[in-house]
Amino acid sequence: MSYTTVFDVTQSGYRQWWFAAFGLIFVAVGFALPYLIRIGLLRKPPRWMEVWFRPFFLGFAILWTVVSFAGTASDYFGLAADLRRNRCEVVEGVVEQFDPMPYTGHRDESFVVADHRFHYSDYEVTAGFNQSTSHGGPIRDGLRVRIHCIGNRIAKLEVANSP
């Protein structure tokens, strides 16, 4: 049987960069605070706030950015390396017990293939496959698939071609 690859972590690239980059906005604001006060865009704060707020704000923003980058990059590079080095379990079969995620979220999409349960959400920051059917994903009941996974994380998803 031939398959078409619909997701491959090694081809998708580092998709979670935006999560870590979001912290850069706050890093920039932290550095810009004295300038914004000087030009009158912000009112001069009380002395205690001048002394403590900026360092804590800036420190937290930098910490958030570094930790979120390290976490998401580690997730991506680790899963991609596992797929390249054939460390992934391969699960093949028909999608059963498919439970789609509502468009608004609030519940993971889930399904079972060969007694292996998978669940994911579009709103989860992960390197693995997470495109729900309500947002254009390919999974549906009765679909024949081949999944390369580490636990519940889908590194590669292939869908069987119609005969």
Image (spheres, rainbow, N blue to C red):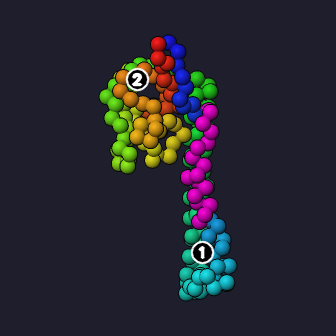
Picture layout, residue 95 above or below residue 73:
above
Q: Residue at x 59, y 65 (%)?
A: 26
Where residue 126 appears, as percent x and y from the top left, is 51, 42
Q: Is residue 74 visible?
A: no
For mark 1, give the secondary structure.
helix
Q: Residue at x 58, y 28 (%)?
A: 83
Label 1 sits on what residue type?
Arg
Label 2 sits on what residue type?
Leu
Q: Quadrant of residue 60?
A: bottom right
Q: Is residue 18 left or right of residue 39?
A: left
Judged by depth in the image, the label closer to the viewer, 2 or 1, is 2
Q: Residue at x 57, y 71 (%)?
A: 56
Q: Is residue 42 visible?
A: yes
On residue 143, which mark appears? 2
Q: Quadrant of residue 9?
A: top right
Q: Residues within 10 Å of mark 1 (few under 14, many from 20)?
A: some
Q: Residues within 10 Å of mark 2 (few under 14, many from 20)?
A: some
Along the viewing direction, whichever of 93 and 82 lies nearer the viewer: 93
